[in-house]
């Protein structure tokens, strides 16, 4: 049996693929956070709860209405986006000109309310969501078996992340969004509806969290606490990539997922803390993050 650094190649590549799957979730979630912070200057602490809400909506759709996985992949993010728009219109829009702390406290409170609501309805034990038939089984790569669903998670996350980056950085719509953020009064003077742009941006950012939640539903047990366990790591990813950096959140999310997977192979005790160690080092060397702009 061939080995890499004394580790059997199956175990090595298996952990690498698992790290890439985790990195895909980190990238999609941190992308939503980066979009919201970069465009709205709001630190959205409700992101983890809305990720959980996406998974819960997929489970509820399947068990109460018979809505399958593919429809859930479309409808659950739309539902989470609608919740986000309601939050933005009713509460967040009054906080944009205030200190970041007010938005953070509000969204943290909303996260606790959402988690408490679902915990009261469904308890804390995990809810099962079966893998779609199309993704049953695994691909034989020669050196390892890659479950089809994990391959789909990686592919879907990459497509959504790159499409989002392209729209925001390379299209006219993205230029309008950036202009509305940097100089709202001037943008409004050109006849662009800035409040509408801001509302849709927040809705899209949280819809990305809902999309990640639906992707996660068949891969792990759905629980009201699944978002709070992940969001701290995702915030670390955003800080390392650079607050508000779209490309930074994608690259850093995937990269840190791989580093986490490799750490589980070589030094498992540090696997849960390696992201925060890297964050501390990056903040010492480059406080704005790897891809962030120094002010």
Image: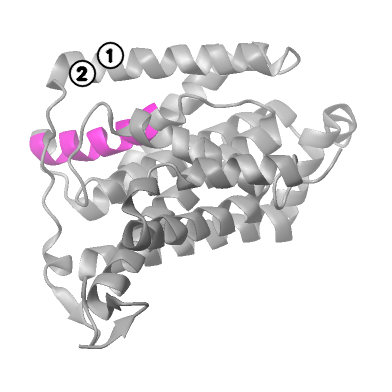
Q: Estimate the x, y position of residue 248 in percent, counting from the top left.
A: 64, 53
User: Is 290 on the left or on the right of 27, as rendered?
Assistant: right
Q: Estimate the x, y position of residue 214 in percent, counting from the top left.
A: 29, 45
- Magenta-highlighted residues: 49-63
Q: Name which residue lies at 70% across and 52% down.
A: 290
User: Is 262 on the left or on the right of 15, as rendered?
Assistant: right
In the drawing, what numbered circle is on residue 213?
none
Establish if 236 lies above or below 84: below
Q: How is the image coloured?
A: one colour
Q: Name which residue lies at 22% across and 79% down.
A: 144
Residue located beneath label 1 in the image: 116
Q: Estimate the x, y position of residue 31 in percent, counting from the top left.
A: 55, 46
SS at circle 1:
helix
User: Is 224 on the left or on the right of 260, as rendered?
Assistant: left
Looking at the picture, tell me which residue is in the foreground, 166 or 13.
13
Quarter where residue 273 is shown: top left
Is label 1 in contact with label 2 (beta carbons under 8 Å)?
Answer: yes
Establish if 127 lies above or below 6: above
Predominant secondary structure, magenta span:
helix
Quarter where residue 146 is shown: bottom left
Quarter where residue 105 is shown: top right
Residue 262 in sight in this render = yes
Residue located beneath label 2 in the image: 119
SS at circle 2:
helix
* Mark 1, other Cα within 10 Å: few <14 / some 14–19 / many ≥20: some
Establish if 103 lies above or below 11: above
């Amino acid at each position: 049996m061939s080995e890499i650094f004394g580790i059997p190649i199956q175990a090595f590549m298996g952990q690498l693929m698992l790290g890439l799957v985790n990195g895909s979730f980190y990238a999609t979630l941190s992308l939503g956070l980066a979009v919201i912070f970069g465009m709205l200057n709001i630190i959205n602490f409700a992101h983890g709860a809305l990720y959980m809400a996406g998974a819960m909506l997929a489970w509820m759709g399947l068990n109460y209405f018979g809505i399958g996985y593919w429809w859930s992949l479309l409808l659950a993010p739309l539902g989470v986006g609608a919740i986000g728009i309601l939050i933005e219109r009713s509460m967040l829009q009054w906080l944009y000109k205030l200190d970041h702390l007010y938005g953070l406290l509000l969204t943290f409170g909303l996260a606790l309310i959402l988690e408490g609501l679902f915990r009261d309805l469904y308890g804390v034990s995990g809810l099962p969501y079966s893998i779609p038939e199309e993704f049953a089984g695994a691909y034989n790569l020669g050196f390892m078996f890659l479950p089809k669903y994990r391959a789909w998670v990686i592919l879907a996350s990459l497509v959504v992340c790159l499409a989002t980056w392209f729209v925001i950085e390379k299209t006219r719509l993205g230029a309008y969004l950036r202009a509305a953020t940097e100089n709202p009064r001037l943008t409004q003077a050109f006849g662009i509806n800035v409040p509408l742009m801001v509302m849709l941006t927040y809705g899209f950012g949280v819809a990305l969290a809902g999309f990640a939640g639906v992707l996660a539903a068949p891969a792990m047990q759905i629980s009201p606490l699944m978002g709070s366990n992940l969001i701290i790591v995702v915030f670390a990813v955003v800080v390392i990539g650079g607050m508000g950096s779209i490309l930074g959140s994608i690259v850093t999310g995937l990269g840190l997922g791989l580093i986490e997977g490799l750490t589980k192979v070589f030094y498992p005790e540090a696997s849960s803390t390696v992201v925060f160690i890297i964050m501390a080092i990056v903040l010492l060397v480059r406080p704005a993050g790897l891809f962030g702009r120094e002010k």
